[in-house]
Amino acid sequence: MQVVYDVGSWRITEEGRVFRRGKLRFANGDLYDGEWVDGKRHGQGTFTYHDGLQYRGEFAANLFEGFGVLVAVDQKHPITGVWVKGSTYEGEFRGGKKHGKGLMVFGEGGSYDGMFADNVFSGRGVRSYANGDRFDGEWKHGMWWGMGHLCRVDGESYVGECKRNLFHTTSLVGGVGRRTFRG
């Protein structure tokens, strides 16, 4: 990337590495304000993309690493022209991806509080949907996968084994009576 301007300070560490702190604006409009080591974003910083997406947190070797906050702004969908509300993720990153414990709040409503792996829901987590439904259970590849409990806004409640967002052995524990079925 071509750099438009660079403002800041630098020093040589005891290990002989170049440590810098400052701002760097790229030709495409992206802006980085933070720390560098040996020419790479490393340490605490804020990266603001030209489209408004912003990451505040820890970096390692130019990638999001450790704890950080990623905020997506409201933007117009390029195909439909409909405005889409942004979302916020606060949690752990590894290798530039959401990985570990995190909380994601969706612009259209709803949230996910739980584990992530390679940018998707993976492991234990609770997803609250904009319509009021709530799923508490295991996730894999961003889908319900393993034991889970779905509480619907209409009062029905399902508990059972899930795979690919579908219940396979389920008990209806809310509503009229109790029944078990395979889906």
Image (cartoon, rainbow, N blue to C red):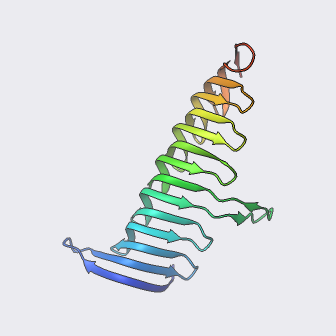
Q: What is the quadrant of the C terminus in the image?
A: top right
Residue plotted at (78% across, 63% down):
79
The image quadrant of residue 15 is bottom left
Q: Is residue 28 above or below residue 168?
A: below
Q: In the image, is residue 75 above or below residue 165?
A: below
Write the residue at 62% across / 34% down: 135
Whether residue 95 is visible to the viewer of this picture, yes or no, is: no
Q: Is residue 161 visible?
A: yes
In the displayed structure, would residue 20 be above or below residue 175? below
Camera-nearest residue between 15 and 111? 111
Q: How many marks?
A: 0
Residue 99 image offset from top left, x and y in percent: 47, 49
Front residue of 108/3: it is 108
Q: Tell me residue 122's x, y (percent).
A: 53, 40
The outermost residue toward the right is: 80
Looking at the picture, how far across and down is residue 7, in whole percent?
41, 85
Which of the 4 image quarters holds residue 161?
top right
- At 44% from the left and 62% from the top, the residue drawn is 57
Q: Seen from this angle, which residue lies furthest left? A: 14
Residue 124: where, in percent of width, then height?
Answer: 51, 36
**Front-lying residue, 128 or 180:** 128
Q: Tell me: residue 23, above or below residue 78.
A: below
Q: Residue at 47% across / 69% down in the picture?
A: 46
